[in-house]
Image (cartoon, rainbow, N blue to C red):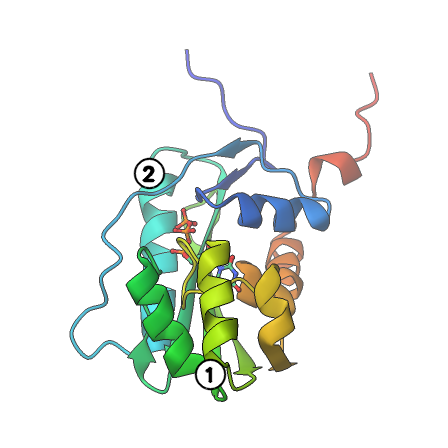
Amino acid sequence: MTVAPAPNTLVLASASPRRLDLLRQIGIDPASIDPADLDETPLRDELPARHAARLAAEKAALVAARHAGSHVLAADTVVACGRRILPKAETEQQARACLKLLSGRRHRVFGGVALVLPDGRTLDRVVQTAVTFKVLSHEETEDYIASNEWHGKAGGYAIQGRAAALIRWIGGSYSNVVGLPLFEVSNMLRGVGFVPAAAQSPTLS
Ligand SMILES: Cc1cn([C@H]2C[C@H](O)[C@@H](COP(=O)(O)OP(=O)(O)OP(=O)(O)O)O2)c(=O)[nH]c1=O
């Protein structure tokens, strides 16, 4: 016998501990976490916003197929300099190249969000944040590289960490840069009547 999921069951389709922390920050604790493993290589000529939207939708669809009847939330964070999509830095070389590109310039962070509803429909959003780095000296760049916090981060930096000391200005959602645009996610969930478990009225017996 299969047990039907509660109507307010939320599955977070993410391996990112930051996304979980961000959701919890607004009082939403997912019932389960089920990361989506997929190829995140941009398509040829794919624009950054489109890339973020596509990956969020693909992650959500993949995981929703394993959780019929639940809300499934997925996101993707893309750092872009103009039309150029920066990689998730895996090596010092990549991180250094990203910082060189970001130094003294304004770039954009696109946060794609996809929410699959229990009836199978999908809602999506792309949230954009502008970020300006100061001009980085050689020493600042190398200190940051030595910190290792760039590892696995889109664009090779983490605004929630030491990179905060290198960022002169930000326009738009801060949480979007960290990994999940909380205002927009909260509105999406509220709009479809999702009530966080803790906020539900106790059932009368
Ligand atoms: C720009 C920036 C990115 N990041 C992170 C957020 C994301 O985890 C990561 C971008 O990679 P994503 O592919 O968006 O996410 P992920 O692979 O970490 O997790 P999953 O796909 O399972 O949800 O970069 C920061 O933590 N801080 C920042 O300032």
Query: Which residue is rendered at x = 56% and y = 49% of the image?
Result: 18
Q: Earlier in the sequence, mark 2 or mark 1?
A: 2
Q: CA distance from mark 2 to mark 1?
A: 42 Å
Left/right placement of residue 99 relative to residue 37 reads: right
Query: Which residue is rendered at x = 56% and y = 84% of the image?
Result: 134
Left/right placement of residue 23 relative to residue 179 reads: right
Q: 58 above or below 50?
A: above
Q: Nearer the viewer, mark 2 or mark 1?
A: 1
Query: Which residue is rendered at x = 40% and y = 68% of the image?
Result: 155
Q: Check disc 1 and report its element: helix, strand or loop.
A: loop
| Mark 1 nearby-residue class (10 Å; few <14, some 14–19, many ≥20) | some
State the mark number for residue 69. none
- Which amino acid is tagged 1? Ser
Instruction: Compare residues 39 and 151 and report the one nearer the observer.
Output: 151
Instruction: Compare residues 92 and 110 and report the one nearer the observer.
Output: 92
Label 1 residue near ligand 1, CB within 8 Å: no
Residue 203 x, y percent position in the rendering: 79, 25
Query: Which residue is rendered at x = 52% and y = 73% of the image?
Result: 140
Residue 189 x, y percent position in the rendering: 61, 54
Q: Which residue is mark 1?
A: 103
- Which amino acid is tagged 2? Ala
Q: 126 above or below 192?
A: below
Residue situated furthest front in the rendering: 139
Label 2 residue near ligand 1, CB within 8 Å: no
Residue 197 x, y percent position in the rendering: 70, 35
The answer to whether mark 2 and mark 1 are in CB contact below 8 A is: no
Residue situated furthest left in the rendering: 44
Q: Which residue is mark 2?
A: 65
Q: Check disc 2 and report its element: helix, strand or loop.
A: loop
